[in-house]
Amino acid sequence: MSIYDTIGGATAVQAAVDDFYVRVTADPVLAPLFANRDLPRLKEHQRAFIAAVIGGPEVYRGRDMAAVHATLGLTDAHFDAVVDHLLAALTGLGVPTETTGQIGAALAPLRSDVVTISK
């Protein structure tokens, strides 16, 4: 059984992404990165991306991670905060620590595509 199925499928992914965006837009460091963005569109892409990463049937059709993040000037701290908010959203939905650890591990290889500024 995939992580996607284990956590509750599309319903759980949608709830996690909704909570994730509440968290990142309330984070004073991350909020400016999301200002004046089309949040419904971002949520749609994020749901498809997360679902695909954790074994769901969704296909992520967005641009590749490096292209999406190239001009944002993101640091390791930004990456860590985003992953932490996503994992906290999943934890808030009752996803076990072992499973959130697996999700975090699945996202870790994306760091080199997302982070463009070493600090």
Image (cartoon, rainbow, N blue to C red):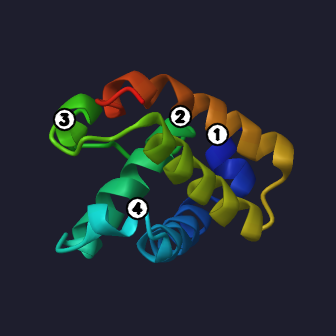
Residue 113 higher or lower than 59, as above or below: above
> What label sits on residue 70 in the rendered view?
3
* Residue bearing the label numbered 1: 103
Cα gap from disc 4 to disc 2, whole angstroms: 18 Å
> What label sits on residue 107 in the rendered view?
2
Relative to 68, 82 lies left or right: right
Q: Position of residue 24 (x, y in %)?
A: 46, 67
Between 54 and 103, the residue placed more toward the observer is 103
Cα gap from disc 4 to disc 3, whole angstroms: 16 Å
Between 78 and 13, the residue placed more toward the observer is 78
Dot placed on the residue nearer the N-terminal end, 3 or 2: 3
**Is disc 4 placed on a helix, strand or loop?**
loop
**Is disc 3 placed on a helix, strand or loop?**
loop
Which of the two discs, 4 and 2, sits closer to the camera?
Answer: 4
Cα gap from disc 3 to disc 2, whole angstroms: 17 Å
Dot placed on the residue nearer the N-terminal end, 4 or 1: 4
Q: Amino acid at mark 1?
A: Ile
For the N terminus, the image quarter is: top right
**Is disc 2 placed on a helix, strand or loop?**
helix
* Residue bearing the label numbered 4: 30
Residue 65 higher or lower than 57, as above or below: above
Q: Amino acid at mark 3?
A: Ala
Q: Position of residue 84 (x, y in %)?
A: 62, 51
Cβ–Cβ under 8 Å for marks 2 and 1? yes
Can residue 57 be seen in this snapshot? no
